[in-house]
Amino acid sequence: MKTIFAIAGVVIKELYRRKDFYVLFALTALITLAAAAVHFFHEPNIIRYVKDLCLLLIWIAAWIITIATTARQIPMERESRTIFPLLAKPVTRGQVVLGKFFGCWLASGLALVIFYLFFIVVTGSREHYWPLLEYFQAILLQWIMLGMLTAMTLLGSIIFAAPSSTVTIVLIAIFSIWFLSPHLNVVALHNPEPMRDILYAAYFILPHLEFFDLRERLVGDWGLVPWSACGLAALYAAAYTGLFLLLTWLGFRRQNLST
Amino acid sequence: MKKVSPGYWLALLLAACFTLATLFVPRAGWWNNAPDAAHWNGRSASDNAFRMLLGDGRKLFANEFFTMADVYFHSGYYPSMFDAHESELDVAAGAQGKAGDSDSTSDDFLGPPKNWIDALGRNFKPNKHTHLDAGGASGNLKTSSVEEILPWLKLSAEMDPQKIETYTVGAYFLRTSLHQPNQAEEFLREGLRNNPRNCEILFALGRLYYDNYHDSNRARNVWLLALKKWNALDAKSKADEKLVSEEITVNLGNLERAAGNDAQAIHWLEAAQKVSPAPAALQKQIDEIKAKMAEPSSSPTNSAR
């Protein structure tokens, strides 16, 4: 466990050395503050469009930070040949995978907390309403989802040749899953066989990111989600995360590192 | 030849760009066929940044933004592009004089959960049909107010200044729920500047004068002007705007009735009967006024006579 967290610590340090987070945070802050500065019909309490915009930017920024951070971990270790002294410690390949996973996941969690702090301060100062438990639920579920995304990106990083291609492919995949997977069952109904069965299978196989997206509930003040539902969503994410990590470990175990 | 620094070249290029911009921008409005309203307002059409950037394509966004106002009106409980949609948006119901939406399909557009994923997913989405003017999802009017739809209506108006519904719906909520008649009047006047021949906006302006400012004279004048504009429409447009004509004449009839001009009231209600889908209800009102006219007057002046 110590080894895993030592590797994770290095990844977290890497996050604050790189510019990705700062640039994305500055962009999010700038766009949100600019949107909040606009007044409509002299109504000072209008806030939901700002919340909506800020949460969307946080989602996109969190994806980019997580994917960009994770995608380069193993390829960079190989390219700079630091993987060899690391594996000679002795550290197993499974520990490397787990260490990289926890590092990236914790780093994305830290970034997420900073983004949400900004969000809470901006919206709370405008509407003077602080539903902290709802915000905690939203952060927690989004972080759990980022764990799934981290594992998926790690798997991509050992399949695809370069970090850039991993980032592009995983981003496209995650956007498609986010947009389509909740509706595939409805789309399936309007298709003839065998397309219907294929779409239904995809509906059940693809991860459902809508379980972790509380943006609409936060914007519309819908209150807390039942904790039992949150628990089920966490189990669902844990299953996918475990599966992706297992596949990553299997792939990484067979990989020839010297080429 | 002396070598010139790239910085000077850059400064020269920027100066040239600025000069060309000052030359072309005032002309660009005329190239884009500035609408009547822009001329009337003394501004070039290029003043609207969206028009400059998107051209006529911005009208596509206007519909989307108007729908977003309806999404916010329902606090996010709204069919996606994959679900069945309503033909009429609830957010416009009040401005069109329709009460509630008891026959709305929004109530159950989701239907029963189709599988366990669907059932679990509904916990994380808005899952109840509510309206912002009744407090939204929390039922608390202090935290959930209808003002939240206004940015989308404003954007919709910016994108398509000819979309009449935007002005009437925005003004309706500003003057009723938000008690901001001044802002409502300003928004309607903006609509009128962009659509000087529109009878719906004039009708909404008349309602504002009558209901909020209690200024019967201005309301009467504006409604008469609205009726004049309606009469100037071609046959097809008249058929499309039949409801507006009915609303104008009925409201004129009620105004005259309240002012004690019973003969005028009957005149307007009879005019309304010609376009109304329910003339019997209007006939009842006419009969009531006639009966009142036939009664011996009980006012002190007439009693003295």
Image (cartoon, coloured by chain):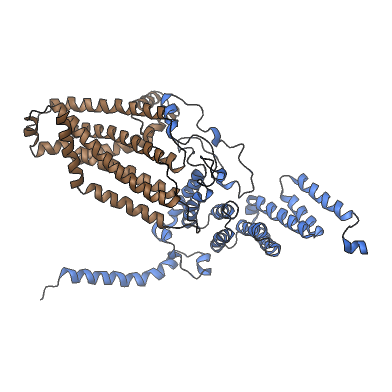
Chain colours: A brown, B blue
Does A229 sit above or below residue A134?
Answer: above
Q: How many marks?
A: 0
Q: Is residue A161 visible?
A: no
Against B119, is B162 above or below? below
Instruction: Let me know if residue B42 appears in the view.
Output: yes
Rendered location of residue A257, percent (x, y): 9, 31
Q: In which quadrant is the C terminus of chain A drawn?
A: top left
The percent position of residue A51, horizontal first and vertical second, equals 41, 47
Left or right position of B240 against B40: right
Identity of the residue drawn at 23% across and 47% down: A20
**Where is the N terminus of chain A found, in terms of image quarters?**
top left
Residue A101 placed where, x, y %?
21, 33
Residue B299 location (% of width, % of height):
87, 60
Residue at 55% x, 64% y: name it.
B193
Q: Is residue B279 left or right of residue A97?
A: right
Compared across the picture, whether A259 is left or right of A115 comes to left
For this rendering, which residue is in front, A237 or B165? Answer: A237
Q: Residue B190: which quarter of the image? A: bottom right
- Based on the displayed image, in which of its 4 quarters is residue A83 positioned? top left
Q: Can you name the residue that lies furthest to the bottom here? A: B1
Taking B38 as reference, is A57 above or below it? above
Left or right, A195 with respect to B226, comes to: left
* Of A182 and A81, the residue lying toward us: A81
Asked where in the image residue A229 lies, by quadrant, the reply is top left
